[in-house]
Image (cartoon, rainbow, N blue to C red):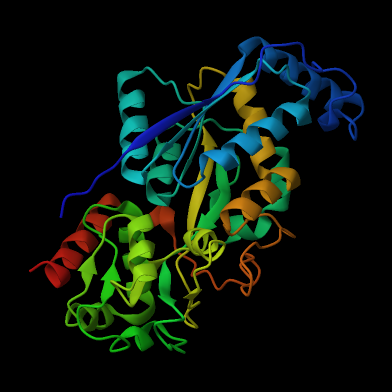
Amino acid sequence: MKTVVSICTIMFVMAIGVGEGYGADAPALQALSGAARQQLEKTIAAAEKEGRVDYTEVVMAAETADALAAAFRKHYGLNTSFLVNYTHAGTTAAVTRIDQEIAAKRVRTDVASISVPTWVFGHAKAGNIMEYQSPEYKHYRRAFDLKLGKEGFFVLNGGYFFVPVWDATRLNFNGKSWKDVVGAVPNGRLAIGNAETSLSVLATYVGVRELVGVDFFKALAKMKPAIVSQGELAHDRVVTGQDLMSLWGQATHVKLRNSKGAQLKLMIPEEGLVLLPQMSFILADAPHPNAAKLWLDFMLSKEGQAIITAREALVSGREGAGTALAGYDLTLERVKAVPINWEALSEADLKRAREEWISIFKQ
């Protein structure tokens, strides 16, 4: 099946004018004093001179990035001419682009949020991610404990997951386990993601396989599932009834469609789920390092997380953060995220898992 990956780059530029600057009125400075305040003032001043920050990620809608950019400028008192250049891409496309920048020694990305933990850990080990101890890290202790970050280098700015999704007007399903999906719909009416082309679907396959075993996937293959390579399309097919269930259910897509009248439901499996963290980091050769630090800190802050979780229904790694999908408690404290040692999972491991998935679903 042909996979279509598109990249859209959206420039958020507010009208050129004189902003608040980095004076005493900047909200970020209000609670600080002494050396901490002086340091932040210097960072804000240096960021103003840099004039921009370039951010790449794989989940957020343009409207969310726009809201973040506006709040970011206000928080640090940056001039309205300060540019937040936001690039949204599919996971594989984003990874390929950053790999190319690093290989060519022409890094243009300052900050990235990528949901391929093995890839991020690898780049940290190779020295391609800046060592930076964000002051917000102290609010992410549980996330670090779950291997959803590496202190001093990166942590998730939000996590998403793939679980069964169905339309309650078309299917009466009361399953609680991954295994309850087997036989839940007629053959040919189930959809799955494409682990051959999607790194995030492949990572989910690896994690769920550890939970329930490979025989679960062999049983699914006997149901003759449709392999759908785009998350939005997978949910649209469930809404229209083309598929009665998809294993590619995402809270973000469910929130959007239900806000327009759909009645999609998710099953949060009792065995647990694979949380795919958007690991957020600064590139070691970031062209705008001071602006990059401010952007990362703001995304991880209480205000930044409130914007992201409210609009995207992601699972926040920040202690005390709320949830944004009615009927579900999607906080890190309540979601049963399966601990996976992403750092130890090698490219060879992923290659073997991909080949196994192909042998099950495409032979």
Say left or right for 120 vs 38.
left
**Front-lying residue, 349 or 337:** 337
The spot of residue 234 in percent (x, y) is 34, 62
| Count of numbered labels shown in the rendering | 0
**Front-lying residue, 244 or 184:** 244
The spot of residue 67 in percent (x, y) is 65, 38
Whether 218 is drawn above or below 49: the answer is: below
User: Can the viewer see residue 133?
Assistant: no
The spot of residue 122 in percent (x, y) is 39, 42
**Front-lying residue, 80 or 243:** 243
Q: Residue at x 65, y 37 (%)?
A: 68
Q: Quadrant of residue 19?
A: top right
Say left or right for 97 vs 144.
left
Locate the N terminus and report the quarter of the image it occupies.
bottom left
Q: Residue at x 50, y 77 (%)?
A: 268
User: Can the viewer see residue 202?
Assistant: yes
**Front-lying residue, 211 or 54:** 54
Whether 300 is drawn above or below 288: the answer is: below
